[in-house]
Image (cartoon, coloured by chain):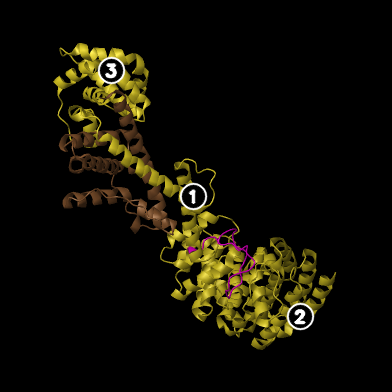
Amino acid sequence: MDSENSACGNPNPNPTLGPSKLMLAFRFLRALSLVHRTTPASSRTCRGRRIERAAYASMAYSAGTGRGWSRAVLRRLHHRARRRAVAPRRLSTTAGNRAEALRQLVPGGAGMDYCTLLEETADYIKCLSMQVELMQGIVDSSSSYGP
Amino acid sequence: MEKEGFWGLQWQSTGAKLPPELNSGPAASDQLPQCFLHLNWKQPMAHDADFESALSSLVSSPCSNPPASADGSGIGELIGRLGGICNSNDISPSYRYRSADASCYGTPLNSPPKLNLSVMDHRQQGRGGPPMPVNRVPGPHLGPLSAEPGFEDGAARLSCFAGRSSGSFAGQFGFLEPGNLSEASRSESPKAGFGSCVGVGQNRSERPAHLETEMRSTIGVSSTAEKSELGNGPEESSLSHRMTAEASSLKGIADNNSGKWKTAAKRKGREAPLSSSATNPPANMTEEENSDAKRCKSADRNGGAKNAAVKPKTEQNGDPGHREGKDNDHKPPEPPKDYIHVRARRGQATDAHSLAERVRREKISKRMKFLQDLVPGCNKVTGKAVMLDEIINYVQSLQRQVEFLSMKLTTLNPQMDVSMENFLPKDMYQSRGLMPQPVYPAEIGTVLSYAHQPQTIALQSVMTSGLEAQFSLNSLQSSLRQSQSMQHATTDAYTDAPSQLGGLWEDDLHSVAQTGFGQNHGQTHTGHMKIEL
């Protein structure tokens, strides 16, 4: 999301502690509202992809630039924004080597050694689960009382 | 006992030969190793009692006549022999030796039994005798022994140590590689060695350590007397390093071995300075160290495995040889090296590469454990492969969930636009460096009143949903405070909200107050409410 990319100032100052859930929620909700505001309701898939991108962007911003995967995500988002490409699909092909498969899954994992890859995976899993939790909460709360 | 008898015989015979051999110089030195070999070969594991008796006999024989100069060499030889014999045994015999030696020579040599191993190996290899059953002693390389002049120097040094060292040495000296001693005797100028080592020895109070290391180095490797501190302590290692350095520089032989010794010494860990001093020697030393380190496993008696390994590693980044830190050589089948593995710290390889690998492996296993806690349902899984599969599946499922939820969110909450801006308190913006969002107090009032009715339910749902409790509570808290301090016409709306929610969240909100949110945020409340709708 362009708005997400440009609007965020200093990311998480404590990368070691992990992203703050509050910040994550804030960023994501802000981006979500922006998406809803800017995209026409007809293009559902387009909006869906934008929301997904917003989710990853908010995750990456919350995690800060201290993490390799967050940097890779932001890099990819910036490039996509410039080139107006579709949200990247993270396909995990069945790699013979498990490490290879993991590298494909974790953003920025291709250029890491195995040790760093494991560390990044742990942080990535943490952030991903937080994001999923947040989104699930939003969906649950809004679906219960929304129209 | 058979051993005893054999030993007695051998010892006697060798002992008898010693004096003439010692005095004869290089020629004799060759013979000595042979004697030693005989001794060692047949007695892989000498029992303490036997040892002592053998030692005493051995010791006494050269005692009788060696001249001053030969004394050192003779003693060295004996010690080497003793060391070789004692190699198989552990430290205990070494101590016994001490007493035996002391009686005869009064030279305190405290070389740990580890040295013996190296010596033994030398012997074996050179003579092609039966391999010592001692685990520590890998295929010895006696062949190079004779080739190394440096070895002699090392041996000489060792012997001089023996002479100069105080009583502590006595027992241990025997453990020093007998090979060294024999070499020393062979060398034409044991005295020179003495002189040099004397000077060196003076510096350290731990003579035994130095001597030991020296011995080890000479024996273990083809003869560069690397002084790895095989285990006697930091001082020893430093001294030994120096000695080895000198020896190696002199000889330039057995580069591998000396390197190992050095590394072993460094590994001892304590001596970061030692290793640095040891690094003085020429580059070949480092290589030697690597090889020596393998041999000097024994050095690390203190067992500071991790620390030692890490310390030398960090300190000697540029010196791969010193990485070893902890090597321990429990595996009897030593890799094909030319040196004898002295008993090293347990559980760690002595090689620089293996040390680095070990550290890396530990890092990886640590991270895998952390991942195991993170991924649900991975506790029962054992093995890296299965764990990796689980992790991959989990990441894939999380990503699919994000995709699915984002699709779901496309149709949801069209009403979040306004509230989003007021979502977080201004405090948060400032503290986190975010862009401040415009505040619309009017909106807040309207939103609050609008969301008045369903707010309890909505907020509750939010609480129960996956949303972060802290998140909602904070926003609510800030909004509540704001609402309470507000004096607008819409105060009633504000008050309504707190009154409605207060019962529910008051305690929680107060408990969450530490987040540091200011007291002037009312927007979050409204924003929050809106979302629920």
Real-space CA distance between mark 2 and mark 3, rounded to the nearest whole angstrom: 103 Å
Nearer the observer, A22 or B107? A22
* Residue B247 percent coordinates (x, y): 53, 76
Real-space CA distance between mark 1 and mark 2, rounded to the nearest whole angstrom: 62 Å
Tell me the colour chain A is drawn in. brown
Of the image marks 3 and 1, the number of the one nearer the N terminus? 1
Label 2 sits on a secondary structure element that is helix
Of the image marks 2 and 3, the number of the one nearer the N terminus? 2
From the viewer's perspective, is the residue at label 2 or at label 3 nearer? 3
Label 1 sits on a secondary structure element that is helix
**Residue range highlighted in magenta:** B323-348
Number of marks in picture: 3
Q: Residue furthest front?
A: A42
Q: Quadrant of residue B456?
A: top left
Nearer the observer, B364 or B110? B364
Nearer the observer, A2 or B515? A2
Image side of residue B116 versus residue B13, left or right: left
Real-space CA distance between mark 3 and mark 1, rounded to the nearest whole angstrom: 46 Å
> Mark 2 belongs to which subunit?
B
Residue drawn at point x = 71 percent, y = 62 percent: B95
> Which quadrant, please, contains the N terminus of chain B?
bottom right
> Which quadrant, please, contains the C terminus of chain B?
top left
In the rendered image of this protein, does residue B65 appear above or below residue B312?
Answer: below
